[in-house]
Amino acid sequence: MVKKEIKYTKYQSPVGTIFLAVSSKGLLSLFFTESESEFLDTMQKKYGEKPESYSLSFGKIFNLLDRYFNGEAVEFDIKIDLAGTPFRQSVWAELRKIPYGSTLTYGQVARVVGNPAASRAVGGACGANPLPVVVPCHRVVASGGGLGGYSAGEGLVLKKKLLLIEGVKTFKRKAFSGGGDYLSVANILTFGFPSAFLRDT
């Protein structure tokens, strides 16, 4: 395995700690965890080496993340280093085209990449995405109003938070009884995330 000379740093976001890793080709990993050792162990298993702590190459991505988490519709126009099968590469490329504040279903993405029967494989590509937020797999949802899955950080809890930051407010309230079908972003910003809403549904 060829060494990538990976460097990393830590970014504190309003939805949790993020560890960022870069190679000479670009951003390699965006990893939601409060545990630095978990991040380093994951990098060791995936790339055969632990990255060096470093901060000078992260100014642009820090700025973009600051703007994103402040509610600005930013485009992450940065170099990225993504390795995957041709199918996953095609899915990740399409995910980067989904506009801020918009969503597509897994089936819609499958059709866009030319394989309408590959909804589950699209889900697999989303789950294997090493750059959540930058490659916005949180914008891919299930048909019929469900959220689908999410592998980063707190899972669906994090996915809901990211969508709410972008103003997406048509989540089905499957975990609620009464009071309408949807939970508005205004109510969440005012009263916080109700515990029932944060359950995986």
Image: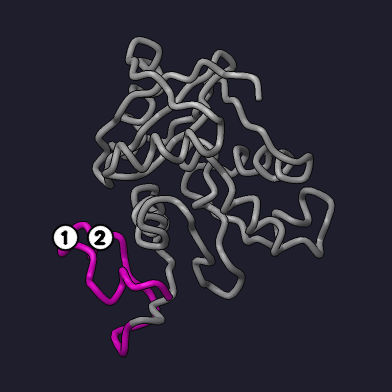
Left of 121 or right of it: where is 99? left
Residue type, label 1: Thr
Judged from this view, the residue extending furthest toward the right is: 114
Q: How would you rate the neighbour count of disc 2 (Cα within 10 Å): few for under 14, some for 14-19, many for 20 or more?
A: few
Q: Is residue 132 magenta?
A: no
Q: In which quadrant of the rendered image does the N terminus lie? A: top right
Tell me the quarter of the picture where residue 71 sits: top left
Q: In the image, residue 101 lies at what x, y percent?
A: 47, 48
Residue at (55%, 37%) from the top-left corner?
Answer: 46
Residue 186 is marked as 2
Report the residue marked by disc 1.
190
Q: Which element is circle 2 on?
A: helix
Judged from this view, the residue extending furthest toward the bottom is: 178
Using the numbered discs, state the Cα–Cα distance from disc 2 to disc 1 in whole angstroms. Answer: 6 Å
Q: Which element is circle 1 on?
A: helix
Tell me the quarter of the picture where residue 87 sits: top right
Left of 111 or right of it: where is 154? left
The one of 138 and 172 positioned closer to us in this rendering? 138
Residue type, label 2: Ala
Residue at (65%, 20%) from the top-left corner?
Answer: 2
Residue at (28%, 40%) from the top-left corner?
Answer: 17
Q: In the image, residue 125 lies at what x, y percent?
A: 65, 50
Residues at circles 2 and 1 in contact by the CB criterion of under 8 Å: yes
Q: In the image, residue 196 lies at what x, y percent?
A: 28, 77
Q: In which quadrant of the rendered image does the C terminus lie? A: bottom left
Q: Is residue 100 above or below residue 63?
A: below
Q: Magenta part of the protein: which range?
A: 176-201
The one of 178 and 162 positioned closer to us in this rendering? 162
Q: Is residue 176 above or below residue 147?
A: below
